[in-house]
Every structure is written in structure tokens, then in C-alpha cells.
Amino acid sequence: MRDSLRAKIINVCDAKIAWKGDNVGLSFYAFFANKNDNPELLLEAAVWWIKTHSLNHFEKALTIRNLVISENSRSENSRIK
């Protein structure tokens, strides 16, 4: 996942959690405007959400945030080795 998408997901999740609490759910569409102005990025998010992780349409923002952070930490550790 590209860094810009990773950062956007974390920021959106943080904002939703701050606004509605730890139980707030969202879909991958939450990271995009209502119009499809970046189909490549939308597809990247959809593949990560649906194909890579087999997530439900709605998932808890806290779960998504932690998953993205965890994957980022693993990829950084593998680059260091």
C-alpha cells in the first residue's frame, strides 16, 4: 500500500474514532470523496480491504487503523533486515 493511502486511512480512522468512539464502523469508501476522482487509489484500497484481508463491508475504524499500523511496522522491519 502506498504511503499516502496508509496515512489517509490512519487520519480518517483517528478522526472517526475521536468523533464517534472506538465502536465506529466504516467502509473503504470513507477514505474517498463522493465522486470517483482517483479510481486507481480507490481500487488499491478495495483490493487491500476485500481481496487481501477479506474484510466485511463495514469494519471498526480501530481495527482498520491497527491493521494498517501493524502492516507498516512489519514492512519497515523487513526492510531493515
Image (cartoon, helix red, strand yellow):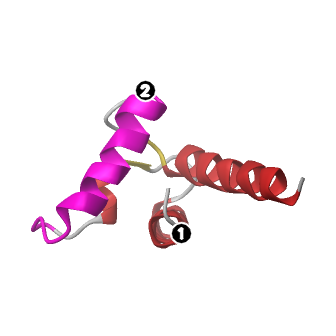
Residue for point 44% across, 66% down:
5
Residue for point 34% across, 52% down:
44
Q: Is residue 41 left or right of residue 48?
A: left
The magenta-colored residue range is 34-53
Badge 1 crowding class, 10 Å Cα cut-off, few under 14, some 14 to 19, many 20 or more, is few
Residue holding disc 2: 54
Q: Is residue 43 above or below residue 76?
A: above
Disc 2 secondary structure class? loop
Outermost left residue: 35
Q: Is residue 8 above or below residue 78?
A: below
Outermost right residue: 81
Magenta-colored stretch includes residue 78: no
- Between circles 1 and 2, the one closer to the viewer is 1
Badge 2 crowding class, 10 Å Cα cut-off, few under 14, some 14 to 19, many 20 or more, is few
User: Which is nearer the N-term, disc 1 or disc 2?
Assistant: 1
- In-front residue for pair 58/31: 31
Magenta-colored stretch includes residue 45: yes
- In-front residue for pair 18/45: 45
Disc 1 secondary structure class? helix
Q: Is residue 32 left or right of residue 61?
A: left
* Residue 54 in view (yes/no): yes
Magenta-colored segment: predominant secondary structure:
helix
Residue for point 34% across, 63% down:
31
Task: Kindly identify which numbered label has been placed on residue 3.
Answer: 1
Name the spot of residue 12 as percent of width and height, x first: 45, 68
The amino acid pointed to by label 1 is: Asp
- Which quadrant of the view contains residue 51? top left
- Which quadrant of the view contains residue 65? bottom right
* Residue 27 in view (yes/no): no
